[in-house]
Image: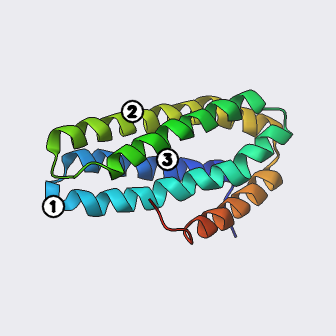
Amino acid sequence: MGQNILNLLRQEHAKMLMQLGELQQREIRDRAELFNQMKNTLLPHMAGEERVFYPRLEEQGLHDLTAGSREEHKIIQALVDRLNSISTADEEDWVDAISKLQEAVRGHVDREEKTVFPEARQKMDDALLLRIGNRFEEAKGKAHLRPLR
């Protein structure tokens, strides 16, 4: 049996923030591997939100909330793309870029958990949140089929 979407997203948010924190602390030799692990959490997470969670929120009339979240995803994706182009050996640029990514993800997580989730909880019953959670897991699985940048 699955979990409701809000619990799943909270768990993944915590995991991503932990991974981003570790990226700033690791030696250069570990960064590339950890960065790829973080992307394997972050990018399917964003894809699942975009394909499954946000459309259900929009059905509930929460277009303004999803518009803000989608914009934040664009910023986060641009920062990931920037990090993909920086050598992990370039300590100064890497730390600067990963700090900006961590800040963007933290802001997104805070906004979702403090604003979006309470609204979703108000508008959606437990059964719907569970169905969305199951569909979210399916969407994430399909996102893994595509190579990460």
Residue ID at (74%, 38%): 120
49, 130: nearer the viewer? 49
Could you tell me if the residues under marks 1 and 2 are in contact, i.e. CB atoms within 8 Å? no
Where does residue 60 sit, x and y in percent of width and height? 84, 37
Secondary structure beneath label 1: helix
Q: Residues within 10 Å of mark 3 (few under 14, many from 20)?
A: many
Q: Residue furthest front?
A: 85
Label disc, if present, on residue 13 of the rendered structure: 3
Q: Amino acid at mark 2?
A: Glu
> Where the C terminus falls, by quadrant?
bottom left
Amino acid under label 3? His
Q: Is residue 18 left or right of residue 61?
A: left
**Residue 108 place in picture, x, y as percent:** 52, 35
Out of 130 and 27, give the one closest to the viewer.
Answer: 27
Q: Residue at x 54, y 39 (%)?
A: 74
Distance, label 1 to label 2, CA atoms, is 23 Å
* Closer to viewer: mark 3 or mark 1: 1
Quick one: SS at disc 2?
helix
- Image quarter where the N terminus lies is bottom right
Counting residues from the start of the chain, the first of labels 3 and 1 encountered is: 3
Q: Residue at x 38, y 39 (%)?
A: 101
Q: Which mark is residue 29?
A: 1
